[in-house]
Amino acid sequence: MVHPKKALVAAAALAGAATLVLAGCSSSSTPTSSASASASTHADPAAACKPGTPSTGPLKIATILPQTGSLAYLNPPAEAGYGLAVQDINAAGGVLGQPVQVGPITDSGASSDLSVSTASAAQIASSDAQVVLGAESSSVTLNFVDTITSKCKVQLSPANTATALSGYSSYYFRTAPPDTVQGSALGNLIVGDGVQKLGFLVFNDAYGTGLRDVVEDTVTKAGGSIVYGAKGKGQEFAPGQTTFSSEVSAVLAAKPDAIAILAFDETKSIVPELKAQGWDMSKVYMVDGNTADYSTTFAADTLTGAQGTIPGAQPDATFKQRLVDFYKTSANADLKDFSYAPESYDAIVLAALAADKGKGTDGPTIQANLAAVSGVNGGEKCADYASCLALLNSGKDIQYTGKAGIGPFNSENDPSSAFIGIYKFDATNVPVFQKSIQGSTN
């Protein structure tokens, strides 16, 4: 098998020659000072970045996505998303008439070993890339975002959802909605299912506890109660924990009507323990960090009826097939998960359009124009790079509607609106899309 990292570089180069020259989530058991900071108290290192004479060299994009660690399953859809976007952009003539370049392509690793993302961020910071795609984990992003944005590079995450990242830096944007949207959607789903008493099994990090707080607020405002794992009770578990006998016994002793599992790979140990202690698995709720394909992990019928949420619109059949075909060609592998692929695609297209609008490929020019091409000032709607570029070249304002269905960036560089997908696990332990709910961050 061709290594995905090398394959995408090769694919970008090959596509360039053929077209007029052509990766919710977070976890940290011991938060760093960076990870524990909030946007309200954080001093933006990019505040010193000032627009200058725009650069007209090639747009260069670096990636820092989970090639290893608990979120590695999200790497293929992200690679397919950004790789296909680069192919489409370059097929339309590139940015400012030049093909987009990809690299360095680095590993964000896991939040349990932040040394991986620290090293990758240092490599990117010293590179000439102007845009950085990643990370998928919010805690991993909080570990290195200052390293990237202090160099006046624009960071675009396709999957970060922690509320601590809202407005964190003027040079940090995301195409996934903050957990205020997903948490509200999940809380309303739980309440709508008639749950009165909810228990949480949640890991202790920015993503887990932030999402828990929003779900808890939604449920309690609707008249429900949290019987285990509530905010301030100290009942969270450490990320990376592998045994859960005592936690499961404790939550079951509280006699909940349903249990929400807010975790990553820890879910693979939690689920068997819940099953062993007799819990009805149809009364389990999950989130984007663990609503995944467990068909080869658990025995058939383990998760039948359990539900989960994943931010983002469900990709249409045509876009899905294009992602599958691209990944098959570039990585010589089958793409089976599409989580955050649309968001990865849109992040790259938005960056390219911002460069086109500002007539420059440098970080400050892209940063200054991202909100505009997302439609914050209105403008004519367009759904793909080629049509949006044509409108920009004719002097018109645009609103790129994209693949993920997000609204224009708000004042905190979050999508102003977004879709949350609701999924239900079938008898093979695969989450099956049920419907989408649109929510607003404003």
Image: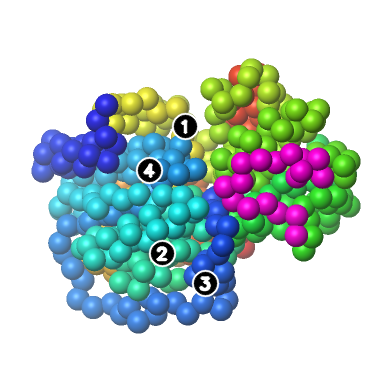
| Residue occupying image coordinates x 67% and y 37% | 270
- Estimate how packed mark 4 is, as few (under 14), some (14 to 19) or many (20 or more) residues with alpha carbons within 10 Å: many
Res 103 visible: yes
Q: Which portion, as a residue range, is magenta? A: 234-250
Camera-nearest label, 1 or 4: 4
User: Residue 88 appears at what percent x and percent y?
Assistant: 27, 41
- Amino acid, disc 4: Gln
Tell me the element at label 4: loop
| Residue linked to disc 3 | 33
Q: Nearer the viewer, residue 257 or 312?
A: 257
| Residue at mark 1 to residue at mark 2: CA–CA distance | 27 Å
| Residue linked to disc 1 | 337
| Residue occupying image coordinates x 35% and y 73% | 150
Q: Nearer the viewer, residue 81 or 10?
A: 10
| Residue linked to disc 2 | 144
Q: Earlier in the sequence, mark 4 or mark 2?
A: 4
Tell me the element at label 3: helix
Res 411 visible: no
Camera-nearest label, 1 or 3: 3
Camera-nearest label, 3 or 2: 3
- Amino acid, disc 1: Asp
